[in-house]
Image (tube, helix red, strand yellow):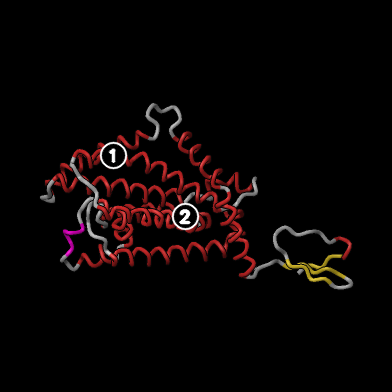
Amino acid sequence: MTTLPRRSQADLEMGGVISRSEKDVSITAAQTWRGRLRMASTDLIDTFKLWPLIWTLSLFDIRLRYRGSLLGPFWLTLSTAVMIGALGFLYSRLFHTDIHTYLPFLSLSLVLWNFISMLTSEGCTCFTSAETVIRGIRMPLIVHAARVVVRNVLVLAHNVVVILGVFLMMHTVPALSSVTILPAFALWLVDGLAISIFLGILCARFRDIPPIVASIMQIAFFVSPVIWSPTILEHRGLGIVLIKWNPFFALLQIVRGPLLGEPLALGTWAIALGYSAILIALAALSFVRVRPRIAYWI
């Protein structure tokens, strides 16, 4: 606590608490959860108001990343198409699966997984990569996490061309239940914002977290049903761990399943919503708790 003469009182910008008396002014920092929650809520509301700025910054990131390239982000689309074509014919033979069934499954899985993987890896650096902006401009911190989400949605939109091409080649027609991908993708956007905030905070504090996250995602790619069908382990004991309790499978399946004509699984939705609730709670608690410290950590 600091005591100042009454004549030297100044306006506080950081939500300080001022207790007045006849002789002096006492200033204490606002460390209550109510004050932190109010500041975090204001940050989130201001972020939604700045969505045109987020869109512009995301487009700028895409143009800057592929500056001087002839195809731009479609290079990633081309490489994804080549990988799907090569792996599709190979693994359909190894798994003894019909190519007309396996290739649409593989194209959806790889495109969606690339979105999840890139969103997770770039979310780790959403605050540290914006160090200059955070220290130089007064801006809501969640803007930088939202910028990562929108940027990867734009990349996903380019890769949807591969899925459409495979579906046309294999004469795959999505079922009427495909409309459920709209709430599923909305859940993905919320989860993407939450994972960017949570990992961005964690990686700003501990700089050795990004390679750990990259290793975890690489392992998750092989143990999750991305290149192999979940029906392989459906009736085996290992399937309970790799499928039933795998958050990546639940999140993939609520988008992938309807597009492949599979029936709506309420159990899968319940698991996906449960994991999403945990992730959102972790991100919210972390952001409310350490928001004032992020600028010092980066």
Q: Nearer the viewer, residue 45 or 274?
A: 45
Position in image of residue 133 (x %, y %): 60, 45
Q: Of helix, strand and loop, which one carries label 2? A: helix
Q: Report crowding for label 1: few under 14, some 14 to 19, many 20 or more residues within 10 A (C-alpha).
A: many
Image coordinates for residue 176, horizontal then vertical, percent: 26, 53
Residues drawn in magenta? 230-234
First in sequence, mark 2 or 1: give its number: 1
- Say which quadrant the N terminus sits in: bottom right
Q: Is residue 46 left or right of residue 257?
A: right
105 over 267 or under it: above or below? above
Q: Is residue 219 visible?
A: no
**Residue at mark 1:** 162
Crowd around label 2: few <14 · some 14–19 · many ≥20 (10 Å): many
Q: Main secondary structure of the magenta part?
A: helix
Res. 69 visible in picture: yes
Residue at point 44%, 57% (across, down): 190
Identify the residue at image location x=64%, y=70%: 32
Q: Which residue is mark 2?
A: 193
How far across and how far down the image is residue 258, in percent? Answer: 27, 54
> Hey, what amino acid is under mark 2?
Leu
Q: Which kind of residue does numbered mark 1 sit on?
A: Val
Mark 2 vs mark 1, CA separation in Å? 25 Å
Is residue 43 magenta-colored? no
Does dot 1 land on a helix, a strand or a loop? helix
Answer above or below: position of 57 versus 124.
above
- Left or right, residue 170 beside residue 188: left
| Rendered residue at 10%/50% (across/down) | 96
